[in-house]
Image: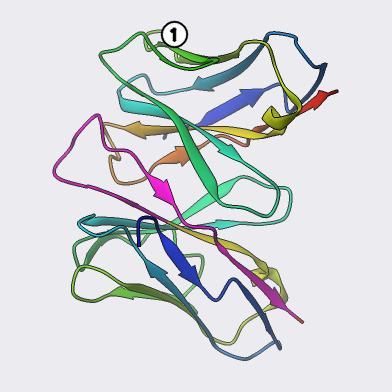
């Protein structure tokens, strides 16, 4: 597709269950970002991929959160043993990422709204 | 550590008014600054990207300026319309942490018909 896509668009789960969120970046974009946005708050950086590598995992809030990217394309964000405070919109973005370019623009997907009951 | 702030937090104006949204950042060593729009329940849409070497960018009724030395950017919206109602976020990509784009908290704009 032309843009960043994410699935599912909505996910309701019970506390303690694991969830997996998916992001399909724009074709040819080597950089991929995950953010979390809690209700009424700004974007919180979670993790960044360049290709399949994640040089910066410092934004992941706990060891229950993990992410991977395969084939330099699709990425999955996994949250284990979900807690109510994990409820948020999880946004994915991609950019060309061809070196440190001042023109590198992020394009966002529509997000996955996660609700933990 | 880069910190980004935006004022005002919320703004309500009558249709047709020109308005200015402000973004401030603490570390002036940046690669670029990007303005986004977020509609309720939706993702972010990129509006304008200003490179560190640029002073301003224009797209239609939008004009974004950048003053790196003072750590400020403004987004000017001319002749506002109800369809402009949304939350506007600025985001900074720093030289010291290129990969970690830092977002401001946003300005919620309402344009009243």
Residue marked by disc 1: B70
Whether A115 is drawn above or below A106: the answer is: below
Marker count (numbered): 1
Q: Which residue does the image show at 28% across and 40% down from the upper left?
A: B98
User: B33 or B42: nearer the eye?
Assistant: B42
The image quadrant that residue A56 belongs to is bottom left
> Residue B79: x, y in percent?
68, 11
Whether A65 is drawn above or below B46: the answer is: below
Location of the N terminus of chain B (image quadrant)? top left
Colouring mode (rainbow / by chain / secondary structure / one colour): rainbow
Observer able to see residue B108: no
Magenta range: A93-116
The image quadrant that residue B105 belongs to is top right
Q: Is residue A106 magenta?
A: yes
In the figure, is residue A44 to the left or right of B68?
A: right
In the figure, is residue B43 to the left or right of A75?
A: right
Q: Which residue does the image show at 37% across and 44% down from the upper left?
A: A106
In the figure, is residue B5 to the left or right of A75?
A: right
Location of the C terminus of chain B (image quadrant)? top right
> Residue A85: x, y in percent?
69, 69
> Residue B5: x, y in percent?
58, 27
Q: Which residue does the image show at 45% across and 15% down from the upper left?
A: B71
> Residue A32: x, y in percent?
32, 57
């Amino acid at each position: 597709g032309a843009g960043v896509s994410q699935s599912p668009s909505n996910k309701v789960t019970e506390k303690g269950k694991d969830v997996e969120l998916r992001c399909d970046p724009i074709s040819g974009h080597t950089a991929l970002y995950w953010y979390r946005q809690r209700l009424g708050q700004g974007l919180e950086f979670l993790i960044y991929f360049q290709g399949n590598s994640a040089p910066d995992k410092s934004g992941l809030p706990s060891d229950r959160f993990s992410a991977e990217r395969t084939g330099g394309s699709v990425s999955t964000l996994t949250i284990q043993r979900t807690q109510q405070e994990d409820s948020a919109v999880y946004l994915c973005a991609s950019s060309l990422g061809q070196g440190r370019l001042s023109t590198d623009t992020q394009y966002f997907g529509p997000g996955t709204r996660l609700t933990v009951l | 550590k880069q910190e980004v702030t935006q004022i005002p937090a919320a703004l309500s104006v009558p249709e047709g008014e020109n308005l200015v949204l402000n973004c401030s950042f603490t570390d002036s060593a940046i690669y670029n600054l990007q303005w986004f729009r977020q509609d309720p329940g939706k993702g972010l849409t990129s509006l304008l990207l200003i490179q560190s070497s640029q002073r301003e960018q224009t797209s239609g009724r939008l004009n974004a300026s950048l003053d790196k030395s003072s750590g400020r950017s403004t987004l000017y919206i001319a002749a506002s319309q109800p369809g402009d109602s949304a939350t506007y976020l600025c985001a900074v990509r720093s030289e010291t942490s290129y990969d970690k784009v830092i977002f401001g908290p946003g300005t919620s704009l309402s344009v009243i018909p």
